[in-house]
Amino acid sequence: MTSADAHQPTPYEVFGGHDFFTSLVGAFYSRVTNDDVLRPMYPPGSLEGAQWRLQAFLEQYWGGPTEYSDQRGHPRLRMRHAAFHIDARARDRWLTHMRAAVDEQGLPPEQEAVLWQYLQGAAFGLQNVVEEPPENPPTGQIFNAEPTS
Ligand code: HEM
């Protein structure tokens, strides 16, 4: 057996290669276009470029071609998202559209679980606005050990 025979397929190949990522990211952006929270974050006319960037990034992340870094350098995703107000609502919209896009691809469940776990973790990691609970919680029966009468 030669070393070429022992080639371990990358997740990129296992998911379905370039066609898979084209379909996934296309399905995702067709939903972003109609989303009133996410759409305004993208400058007019920029969606096509954004679609390429997300797709190329994901392909590279999962072991496919390195076109993303060839053109964009180190991903630095936290930094590149800093300009956008990504609160829990934006994060959840992003994940809702991505979930629908993943569902459409019909991956075997174990592959789908790996992909989804990553996407979910990444989206939570890129949230950059966290709503703090009020500093002084309202007083009352629940917070007050003293009898009220
Ligand atoms: C949490 C919700 C998210 C929001 C609201 C969001 C929003 C955005 C926006 C508005 C852009 C600029 C579009 C452009 O490229 O011109 C962008 C870029 C990008 N996003 Fe996100 N994003 C989110 C999560 C993610 C996640 C989870 C990933 C990766 C798994 C990701 C990967 C990227 C990449 C690769 C770019 C292009 C960076 C560059 O090269 O400039 N985003 N995102």
Image: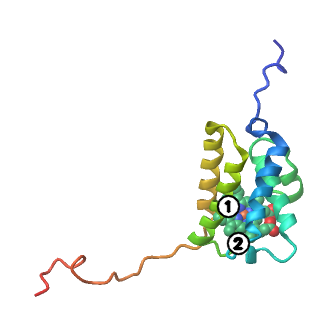
Disc 1 crowd, CA 10 A, few/some/many (<14, 14-19, 20+): some
Q: Disc 1 marks which amino acid?
A: His
Q: Disc 2 marks which amino acid?
A: Asp
Depicted 84 relative to depicted 110: above or below: below
Q: Quadrant of ligand 1?
A: bottom right
Expressed as whole percent of the image width and height from the top left, the position of residue 126 reads 63, 63
Depicted 143 relative to depicted 104: above or below: below
* Left or right side of 57 for 120: left
Q: Tell me if I can see residue 78 in this picture.
A: no
User: Residue at 14% of width from left, 85% of height from top?
Assistant: 148
Assign a secondary structure to mark 1: helix
Name the image quarter holding the C terminus: bottom left
Instruction: Determine contact: label 2, label 1, CB under 8 Å.
Output: yes
User: Residue at 84% of width from left, 77% of height from top?
Assistant: 44
Which residue occupies the extreme top position in the image? 1
Mark 2 lies on residue: 35
Residue 13, by quadrant, is top right
User: Residue at 74% of width from left, 74% of height from top?
Assistant: 39
